[in-house]
Amino acid sequence: MKRTLTQTALEFCKLRGTGLWLVALLSGMAAIFLSLYLVVADQGTAYTFALFTGNIISNTQSELLPCTAVFLLGQMMERERTCGALKNLLAVPLTFRRLLGVKAAACAVMTLLYSAAQWAFALAAACALGLPGLDSAAAGRAFVCIAGANLCVYLAVLPVAVLGARYAGGYAPATAFALFYGFFGSMISTRRWGVFYPTLAGSVLFPPEGAPQPGQAACALAALIVMTALGVLLLARARDRSR
């Protein structure tokens, strides 16, 4: 366990001096800006802080985080290939599947940091707009909902990210697929069977207002468990396909 934590921390050291932090930050802020646009443009809706938070979650899970998460994990592995470090790393007692697993764990932590940045900017935007319903309890609930929903999205795209990272240059088609994967979720989010769609599980399990509906929550949780199990299975059987 200690070794895994150390290796995960080292992954963050490797990210210093790269543009991946900026990519993650811009992706997270894009959801805020889209939600701000809805508040300003939609004059017919009485926006509250909870509704604003729901818009952020919806924009993140359908258009931004799926492709961002796949791109980040793929790029973290691609950098090991392009700088020639992967061959050296695999020459020591470090398997490819363990290296990829550590990078996947680092991406999960980055997802939490991504969520914290979104939450902080959401609070600042809500204060600037004077949205009703913002208090300490609502702020705490918003953090849980944003972080929980974002982690659900990460688990939903984990199989795609792992598959893409196994191949040299595989992150590009995997990112393109994740973009479609997330966007399709926004198209079916209003349908009853949309609760079975993995990237939508977060908004079902962590609604900004009210409690999750038991039937829908069970369907969403089942879809998420399937995708998580598939991602773990692919990680356990991961091999470098550079050649």
Image (tube, rainbow, N blue to C red):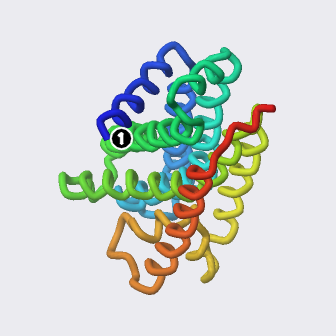
The image quadrant of residue 4 is top left
Whether residue 7 is visible to the viewer of this picture, yes or no, is: yes
Q: Residue at x 75, y 38 (%)?
A: 241
Q: With 229 as the anchor, is 163 left or right in this view?
A: right
Q: With 187 as the anchor, is 20 left or right in this view?
A: left
Q: What residue does disc 1 label? A: 116
Q: Residue at x 47, y 73 (%)?
A: 221
The image quadrant of residue 212 is bottom left
Q: Residue at x 63, y 46 (%)?
A: 238
Q: Is 209 placed above or below 216 here? A: above
Q: Position of residue 18 (x, y in %)?
A: 55, 18
Q: Quadrant of the C terminus?
A: top right
Whether residue 128 is visible to the viewer of this picture, yes or no, is: no
Q: Position of residue 229 (x, y in %)?
A: 53, 64
Hey, what amino acid is under mark 1? Answer: Ala
Q: Residue at the left extreme? A: 136
Q: Residue at the right extreme? A: 243
Q: Is 230 placed above or below 166 here? A: below
Query: Of residues 133 and 138, which is closer to you in this image?
Result: 138
Q: Position of residue 150 (x, y in %)?
A: 46, 52
